[in-house]
Amino acid sequence: MYKDHFILDYDPHLTQKEYQNTVLDQNVNLVFYKKNCPYCQAGKSVVVDAANKGSYPTFYIDTQTEEGQKLVEKYQVEKAATIIKIRKGKIKKYLYASRDSEEKIVADEKSIQEAIND
């Protein structure tokens, strides 16, 4: 009945634990999220879709876990709906959702594309 309807979800294999085992100077994306965060939920499908098409590994960091909190502190993440782009040791932060002119929470597709792709 629902076989054509699916929900994109964060890849359970690319988590904060896996990221901590990678070399720190690799080119990667870190997508921070928090369960029940309306901004994270608004951007989730766009982020997951972009990451699946992107050239670099994307790790999904649950900010409510102990490992996630360590990465929040390390990268000074202030809001859960954040992407950290690491390229050749350089770090750049992006918010992947925000309120539009009508105060509706929406995915920031431009920021997501810039963060995930070079």
Image: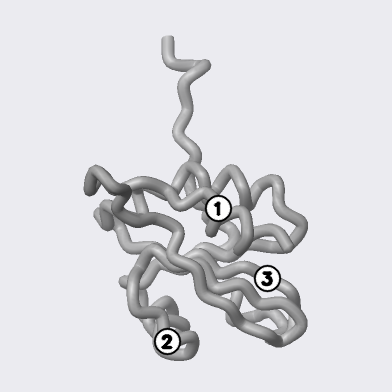
Say which of marks 2 and 1 sits in front: 1
Amino acid carrying mark 1 in the image: Lys
The answer to whether residue 35 of the structure is visible from this angle is yes
Farthest residue, direction top: 1
Q: Residues within 10 Å of mark 3 (few under 14, many from 20)?
A: many
For mark 2, give the secondary structure.
loop
Q: Are marks 2 and 3 in contact (CB under 8 Å)?
A: no
Label 2 belongs to which residue?
Answer: 76
Q: Position of residue 53 (x, y in %)?
A: 70, 46
Mark 2 or mark 1: whose residue is earlier in sequence: 2
Q: Quadrant of the N terminus?
A: top left
Q: Residue at x 73, y 63 (%)?
A: 118
Q: Residues within 10 Å of mark 2 (few under 14, many from 20)?
A: few
Above or below, 22 relative to 42: below
Considering depth in this image, is 32 or 4 the residue closer to the camera?
32
Label 3 belongs to which residue?
Answer: 28
Q: Would you say 55 lies left or right of 113 here?
A: right
- Measure how far apart labels 1 and 3 are at the Cα level: 18 Å
Label 1 belongs to which residue?
Answer: 110
Q: Are marks 2 and 1 in contact (CB under 8 Å)?
A: no
Q: Position of residue 95 (x, y in %)?
A: 43, 65
